[in-house]
């Protein structure tokens, strides 16, 4: 609960930023908790990434008018 609460607070703070140089800004956070979601760093990262994708898909489904950019393999490797 604490990790999800913290993620919500970070998203809320970032949500106050409307744009940077006239480009819209948004933020999504995926949370994974040890040991419930994984025992290794790789497992936790995989679960956090899956949680992030769920949040983004839910947000897009709730408001399809908002531009939605899916991460490509190229942007994922740069992250």
Image (spheres, grey):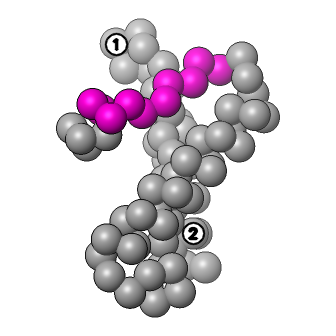
Indicate which disc, 1 or 2, sits on the residue closer to the N terminus: 2
Q: Is residue 9 visible?
A: no
Residue 17: horizontal and vertical position, in percent? 47, 31
- Foreground residue, 30 or 43? 43
Q: CA distance from mark 1 to mark 2?
A: 30 Å
Quadrant of the rendered structure where residue 73 is? Answer: top left
Q: Is residue 18 above or below residue 61?
A: above
Residue 27: horizontal and vertical position, in percent? 48, 40
Q: Which residue is mark 1?
A: 21
Q: Is residue 59 above or below residue 4?
A: above
Please name the predominant secondary structure of the magenta segment in the image.
loop
- Foreground residue, 55 or 17? 55
Residue drawn at the location 78% of the way across and 34% of the way down: 62
Quadrant of the rendered structure where residue 19 is? Answer: top left
SS for dot 2: helix
Residue 2: horizontal and vertical position, in percent? 54, 79
* Residue 1: in magenta span: no
State the extent of the magenta-drawn residues as a range. 66-75
Q: Which residue is mark 2?
A: 4
Q: Residues within 10 Å of mark 1 (few under 14, many from 20)?
A: few
Position of the N terminus, as image quadrant, is: bottom right
- Foreground residue, 60 or 21? 60
- Foreground residue, 28 or 71? 71
Residue drawn at the location 46% of the way across and 89% of the way down: 35
């Amino acid at each position: 609960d604490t990790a999800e609460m913290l993620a919500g607070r970070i998203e809320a703070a970032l949500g106050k930023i409307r744009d940077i140089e006239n480009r819209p800004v948004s933020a999504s956070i995926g949370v994974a908790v040890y040991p419930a979601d994984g025992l290794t760093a790789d497992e936790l990262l995989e679960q956090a990434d899956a949680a992030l994708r769920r949040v983004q898909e839910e947000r897009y489904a709730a408001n399809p008018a908002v531009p939605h950019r899916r991460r490509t393999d190229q942007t994922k490797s740069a992250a």
